[in-house]
Image (cartoon, helix red, strand yellow):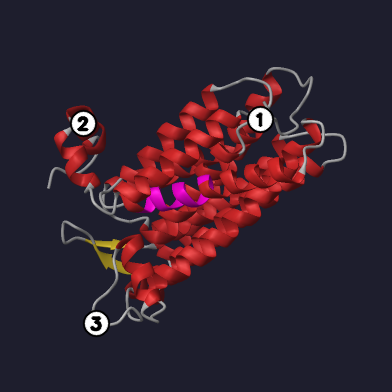
Amino acid sequence: MNRIPGRGGAPASAPDRSLLGVALHALGATVSWSAGLGAVESLRPRLERTNFHGRAVSLRGGIGAAAGAVAAGSRAGHFLRDPAGRGSRRVTMAALVATTAAGAAGLADDLDAGAHDGGTPAKGLAGHLGALARGRVTTGVLKIAVIGSGALVSGVLLARCRGPVSGGRGPVPTAVDAVTSAVTIAAWANVHNLLDLRPGRALKTAALLSGCLLADRREGTEAGRALAAGALGVVVAALPEDLLEDTMLGDTGANAVGALVGTALAAHPGRTVRVLAALAGTALVLASERVSFTRVIARTPVLAALDGLGRHAS
């Protein structure tokens, strides 16, 4: 088990207080950004979109969620403690790079609204890559490049965190670790965006994954738990308005929150967990090219019940 340096012999209650601090920091950033944007009258038309019910919703919720994800990343390093402070800084930088890249790429796509995608907008991973092969650069291609680059940088940072505590690994194991982490971050950023077709769905997914990570209190899980706490802070702040269909995550919020959750998974000390997270995320992205997640959820009673929890009936 290759772990990221943690808090050593800190009192049992101190980590819990620190986790709460990360969550509250993310919650506060989410609420303040969303409310602040909502108070600017001139921005309202620019941020207004129509959802699947035909209701007018605002992208301010997604921008707020992205701000909360970045804030969580900036705070997570305070939960860690290692002798030189390098582990804490690298975790912080990994989360900041991943969430900022994902949020910025999503915002560009949301604000563009397909204006530069041509008369026949590309859909899905295959559609955007196909458009690129024909010489057309879509906003989807931009997202793949920016989110992928951010995920790779973050993966390298996390892999280097694990190097010192695993006896100084060679270049090949470190490279494999970095790529696995990068795939995990990029894939889950995309998965959350793919799930953001109904109110609350992506945020509920983030909450479930983050809850699982928080429940793992083994040594070395501090980084992932801190980032998961931040993700839960974003969920608590953003979910009510998302379910009420006052706001929406859009690509901005879904990608950023997904990148935060992906970074939390990639920070897990267990190699098996990281590999499974990378494989599961990739499998879901590829499956989305042929399978409708909405139909699968509707046909599965347990998933349908969770999906509809707290949402408008029509």
Horizontal and vertical percent for residue 2?
69, 30
Q: Quadrant of the N terminus?
A: top right
Separation of residues labelled 3 and 1 (CA atoms):
48 Å
Which quadrant of the figure has residue 14? top right
Badge 3 is on which residue? 119
Circle 3: element type: loop
- 241 vs 82: above or below: below
Front residue of this view, candidates 177 and 99:
177
Residues drawn in magenta: 184-193
Is the Cβ of the residue at disc 2 closer than 8 Å to that at disc 1?
no
Q: Amino acid at mark 1?
A: Glu
Q: Nearer the viewer, residue 72 or 192?
A: 192
Q: At x 54% / y 37%, what residue is drawn? A: 265
- Front position among marks 3 and 1: 3
2 or 1: tag closer to the N-terminus: 1
- Give amino acid for label 3: Gly
Q: Is residue 177 left or right of residue 252?
A: right
Label 1 environment density (alpha carbons within 10 Å; few <14, some 14–19, many ≥20): many
Earlier residue among tags 3 and 1: 3
